[in-house]
Amino acid sequence: MLYTQGKTEVSPAEVGYDESRIQVLNDHFQRLIDDGEIQCATYCLSRKGKVFAHGAVGKKSFRKDDNTPVQPDSIRWLASITKLFTAVSIMKLVEDGVTRLDVPVAEILPQFNTPPYNGITLFQLLTHSSGLHTDDGCFDNKYQSSYWALMERAYRLYDPEKD
């Protein structure tokens, strides 16, 4: 198994975690790699605010001749998979009554508490109907407006005397 250990703050035992489960996790990821389901995996586990496991399994590159191990802090291209985890996490919070989909994002992230962003709701973010643009330069898009230029333009329109 190609495994790399990352930085941790405490041992699993110090936060009441069964250390043998980390090997189960590593073995699971190795089986997925062996079956060709994934190329590599990284993880960071914490409990009580302390990181107790930080590891990486597999190769950094898909190339057969490159056996460079993936590092726990390697930056990987994940495409849109994070949207799935974000949506499920938010819906779990909604289900538990912690938040609602009609809540303005500004109530959660103070950076959104300025016009025109202060009206954007969680629902709009989840359904990609907020009007926000992707970061300039992330994708080749001839119609892309610079997000920072849009923010600057909106900031110039803001008049604190009117609020």
Image (cartoon, rainbow, N blue to C red):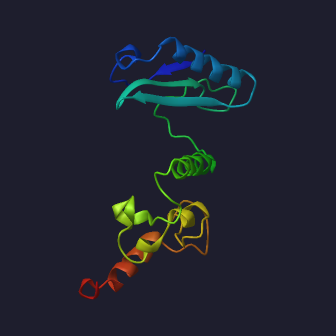
Q: Residue at x 48, y 70 (%)?
A: 120
Residue 112 in percent (x, y) is at 39, 66
* In this view, 73 is above or below 100: above
- In the image, 148 versus 62, the foreground residue is 148
Residue furthest out toward the top: 20
Give residue 47's quadrant in the image: top left
Is 155 placed left or right of 85 in the picture? left
Where is residue 114? Give x, y as percent: 35, 73
Residue farthest along the bottom direction in this orientation: 162
The residue most toward the left is: 161
Quarter of the image where the N terminus is located: top right
Looking at the picture, tell me which residue is in the foreground, 44 or 14: 14
Q: Position of residue 92 (x, y in %)?
A: 55, 47
Number of labels in the image equals 0
Viewer-proximal residue, 80 or 76?
80
Whether residue 79 is visible here, answered yes or no, is no
Residue plotted at (38% across, 59% down)? 109
Occupied quadrant, residue 51: top left
Q: Position of residue 131 (x, y in %)?
A: 54, 73
* Residue at the (42%, 77%) spot, across then down: 116
Question: Which quadrant holds the C terminus?
Answer: bottom left
Q: Residue furthest front?
A: 97
Q: Is residue 71 above or below residue 100?
A: above
Residue 158 shows in this picture = yes
Q: Residue at x 60, y 75 (%)?
A: 143
